[in-house]
Every structure is written in structure tokens, then in C-alpha cells.
Amino acid sequence: MLRLVLLSLFFISSVWGAPGNAKIPVLCYHRFGPEVSDSMTIKTVAFAEQLAWLKSNGYTVIPLDTAMRYLKGEVKTLPAKPVVITVDDGHKSVYSDMAPLVKKYKIPVTLFVYPSAISNAAYAMSWEQLRELESTKFFRVESHTYWHPNFNHEKKKLSPTEYDKFVDKQLGGAKKKLEERMGHEVKYLAWVFGIYDDELERKASQAGYAAALTIDRAHTAAGKKMTSQPRYMIVSKHDIRAFERMVNGTEDRMPASKKEVIRY
Ligand SMILES: [Zn+2]
């Protein structure tokens, strides 16, 4: 009987597997351009330099979905030196400046967008542009809430019941809207302004997100909660040496007191 139990346990674990123990750097970009107009914009040539550096140093850019499923034990193996690229906010420079480089290097990129801006705000891409990017197979659209609110401010302003409804709309409502518009399941969420807490994380799971990403500047790892997996936000001041420290884990291994904190 015991052997049977052990055998079935072995069978179950070999089917589902244990979560992978590799740590993966997930990068977070915002805007690209010929000049640095604000701290969130990085020069397109700097991004090109980073992609060339990754390639010549043996890194492989993998889809966010592969990385998250690996952390859950659903994907067994990864290429050596995996790295994930994400972009928040749906800025039109993704279409004009970033996409040509993505197509040149043939790398997967996840776009976290908020539906209220798309085909609406002057700085944002249109639904047609997002669909065109997805048709290249290099891009995938995921959720960045409905209209990019500051949850800390809203929590102070609203009653508990109102706040509850507000969070549902921002998390579940955005997921539904993006699924309608893009015609595929939306599995992942990027926390706005990097703000999250236990309550928000619980609500993200309830809304059906498989994982949510922060900007806490560390590698993702199976030991961390799936609703607060970290990313490295890259801004204009980061040179190629700083970039190298992010992807090779040097920054992750720094004591917390020495770590950079970037807020926006
Ligand atoms: Zn954002």
C-alpha cells in the first residue's frame, strides 16, 4: 500500500513537477525615443545597445508566460541565461521606435496596457496598432488596470465598499475589456506605480490573473508570491553597466540598503 502511495506521489510530481529554481530577470520599460524627454524615456539607441549586449553575452529573451509557468512548475526547462522584456503603459513609441528592433532581434515582448488610454490618449497606441503588433507574434498584450489609478489615493478617498468595487473594476474590468478587444485570454497584471498589498494581491487572484508583476528590483523566483513577482524598471540614467548588473543578478544580490529605489 505504501509503495502504491509513493508510486502515485512520484507520478503526480513528475506530471506537475516542482517549481523551477532558476531566478529570472524581468525588465520593465516605458518609452523610447531619439532624445530623452523625461526620466521614463530611454534612447532608442540605448535599447538597441542593450539588445546587442544580451545577444553577444548569450542571453535568451523568453516570453513572460514561459517564465511565470516555469515558476509554477508547468514549464520544466529554460534556455541558459533567460531574460524577460515587458513595457508598461502602451506608449506610441513602442510602435514607432521599439517594434523595429523587436522584429530585428525576433524577441518576445509583453505589453502591459490600460484600456482607458488606448485609441484615446494622445500618447498611447490604438487598438489597431496593438493588434498589428500581436500579429507579428513577437508582442503580447496584458493588463495594467483599467485607467492607471493610484490605489493608495483611492483607498483614502473611497468608503470600503466603494473601494472594493473600484478595485474590481480596475482588475477584473480591465481583464475583461482587454480580452474582448484583443480576442485572447489576459493572464498577467502589472501593478500601477508599483503599488500593491495583500488585499490587492488577493483581488488579483480572484479576478483570474495567473501572476502580477511589481517594480521591486529583483529577479523573479519560485519562492516569491506569484501576485508580486519583481521587475527591474529601466530609466534613462541606466547605462550599459547598470543594465549588466540588473540582468546578471549583481543588483539582486546587493543588500537591501544599497539597492536602488525608483519611483514614478
Ligand atoms: Zn504604468
Image (cartoon, rainbow, N blue to C red):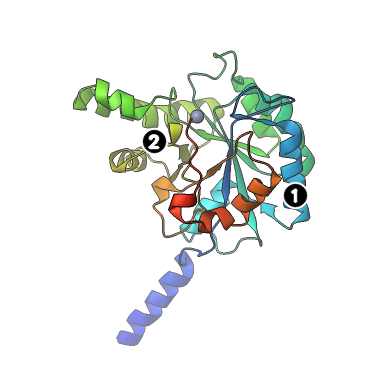
Residue type, label 1? Trp
Q: Is residue 243 left or right of residue 104?
A: left
Q: Is residue 153 left or right of residue 117?
A: left
> Mark 1 — residue?
53
Residue type, label 2? Ile
Q: Residue 22 occupies which quadrant of the picture?
A: bottom right
Name the residue at the front extreme.
Answer: 258
- Residue 128 vertical placement versus 103 (above, below): above
| Secondary element type, mark 1 | helix
- Residue 245 vertical placement versus 156 (above, below): below
- Dot 2, crowdedness within 10 Å: few (<14), some or many (≥20)? some
Q: In the image, residue 200 lies at what x, y percent?
A: 32, 38
Q: In the image, residue 172 lies at what x, y percent?
A: 37, 31
User: In percent of the image, x 48 and y 30: which residue is there?
Assistant: 264
| Observer able to see residue 106 | no
> Mark 2 — residue?
195
User: In percent of the image, x 36 and y 81: which residue is there?
Assistant: 6
| Observer able to see residue 130 | yes
